[in-house]
Image: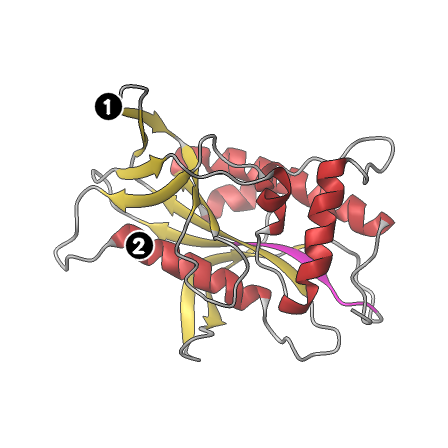
Amino acid sequence: MAQVLRDNGIKFTQSEYYRDVESGDLREIDLSIRISLRDYDEEMPGIYLCPVIECKSSPGKPWILFSGGVTLSDSAKIAQRYVLKRAWNHWRNFANQVVRGHVVPEPWPLHFPSFSYSDPPAYSAVRTSLGKSREDAAYGAMTSATKASYGIANQYPAHRNAALQIAMPVIVVDAPIYSCKLGTRGEPEIERVSKGTIVWRNRVLAESVGHPIITILSEEAVPEFCSDLNQTAQSLRAYFERYPWYDRQM
């Protein structure tokens, strides 16, 4: 994972720490990415795209994504990401503008592939075999990635120039991933996939907005993830250059 990120020019931090908003304890996440979306200006807070990545090794133990019964509006696919609490209304308005086609810097349109999701999305995931400790690895990974995303998005909230960090939970596994959904006759349909999206009904944190949107990737999907991330960052950078709504007065 780390080498693929380096090959794609994406800077990251290994063993990043965040503060658990519920317990107040410092906890560790495997990788965090922080892509700057605006040139440094001491008069303005920074803006960053921040995938937060939990890596799970379970060779020979496939992960199953259970799909069906989950839908999100096009604006919610963008809006339901983790950002600084006081910036949420601005971020929601940004999502609505994108969906309505109101922000198209010339000469090229905006594209945000990192905010897209699998169709249909999953509502939960399991690993097919529990470990010796009987730990539910999928639940633990989803909880860790979600809490870390919230914690990183809301670092230093009281600072007058607190950065806008758009955090997205990601899980990378070195095992096969399968999508499972019910067919038209009620029978399960199982398909191997390289990536998927979980719109998790477990909000984990009561004060967070909407359901967590979690990306899950196999190792083979990491290069495409990097390409999507760079394209999304390019579009966000173009947007913030033209519409710098996030400033110290927010």
At mark 2, the secondary structure is helix
Name the dominant secondary structure of the magenta segment. Answer: strand
How crowded pointer 2 is (Cα within 10 Å; few <14, some 14-19, many 20+) is rated as some
Identify which residue is drawn at 81% across, 66% down.
Answer: 247
Give the distance between the C-alpha atoms of the residues marked 2 and 1, in whole angstroms.
25 Å
Task: Tell me: 102 left or right of 65.
Answer: right
Give the answer, above or below, for where 238 lies relative to 158.
above
Residue 187, numbered circle: 1
| Residue mark closest to the camera, 2 vs 1 | 1
Residue 49, numbered circle: none
Give the answer, above or below, for where 226 lies relative to 40.
above
Q: Nearer the viewer, residue 31 or 51?
A: 51
Q: Badge 2 is on which residue?
A: 139
Confirm whether the magenta stretch covers residue 207.
Answer: no
Q: Nearer the viewer, residue 134 or 210?
A: 210
Residue 120: image quadrant is: top left
The magenta-colored residue range is 44-51
The image shows a total of numbered marks equal to 2
Using the rendered image of the protein, determine whether residue 8 is visible from the camera's viewpoint: no
- Residue 43 in picture, x, y percent from top left: 85, 71
Give the answer, above or below, for where 3 lies relative to 207.
above
Confirm whether the magenta stretch covers residue 45.
Answer: yes
Given the image, on which type of amino acid does mark 2 rest? Tyr
Using the rendered image of the protein, determine whether residue 108 is visible from the camera's viewpoint: yes
- Residue 234 in picture, x, y percent from top left: 72, 42
Position of the N terminus by quadrant: top left
Identify which residue is drawn at 41% across, 62% down.
Answer: 204
Position of the C terminus by quadrant: bottom right
Task: Tell me: 175 left or right of 131.
Answer: right
Task: Tell me: 96 left or right of 223.
Answer: right
- Residue 66 in picture, x, y percent from top left: 32, 37
Given the image, on which type of amino acid does mark 1 rest? Glu
